[in-house]
Amino acid sequence: MLTDGASAAVDQYQLLDWRGLLDVLTDHGPHELIRRVREAETADGDGHARRRYKRHDDASAALCLFEEDQP
């Protein structure tokens, strides 16, 4: 589950594709995904701050993994 602020890693900033986003969540957790989005929010390709109407968009991510029961 992602808010639009977290999905911006794919939708807006093209930091990852959807598979890569799931890999980051699985391997490093939501904090790493949000860290990457925050980094992209504060800088463009030249390191200059992006002009935004607010500093950060809300960003939340949750990953729930289910394991199959083995007989």
Image (cartoon, rainbow, N blue to C red):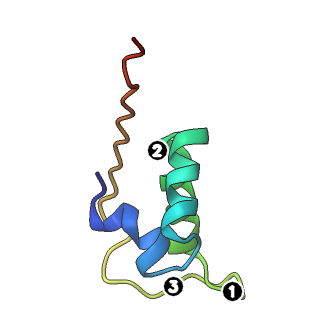
Residue type, numbered disc 3: Arg
The amino acid type of the residue labelled 1 equals Gly
Q: Secondary structure at mark 1?
A: loop
Q: Which mark is residue 30?
A: 2
Which dot, 2 or 3, sits closer to the camera?
A: 2
What secondary structure is found at the residue carrying circle 3? loop
Q: Based on the displayed image, in which of its 4 quarters is residue 44 positioned?
A: bottom right
Question: Is tag 2's residue or tag 3's residue first in the polypeptide sequence?
Answer: 2
Residue farthest to the top?
Answer: 71
Q: Residue at x 37, y 17 (%)?
A: 69
**Foreground: 70 or 63?**
70
Q: For the residues marked 2 and 1, what is the alpha-carbon distance in whole angstroms? A: 24 Å
Q: Depth-wise, is mark 1 or mark 3 nearer the camera? A: 1
Q: Quadrant of residue 65?
A: top left
Circle 2: residue type: Pro
Give the alpha-carbon distance from disc 2 to disc 3, as whole Å. 23 Å
Query: Disc 1 or 3, which lies upstream in sequence?
Result: 1
The one nearer the camera, 17 or 6, is 17
In percent of width and height, residue 23 lies at 57, 51
Farthest right residue in view:
46
Q: Could you say which disc has been placed on residue 50 in the image?
A: 3
Image point 57% across, 50% down: which residue?
24
The extreme front residue here reads 71
* Residue placed under numbered mark 1 in the picture: 45
* Position of residue 11 measured from the top left corner of the image (x, y, whole percent): 41, 79
**Disc 2 packing (10 Å; few <14; some 14–19; many ≥20):** many
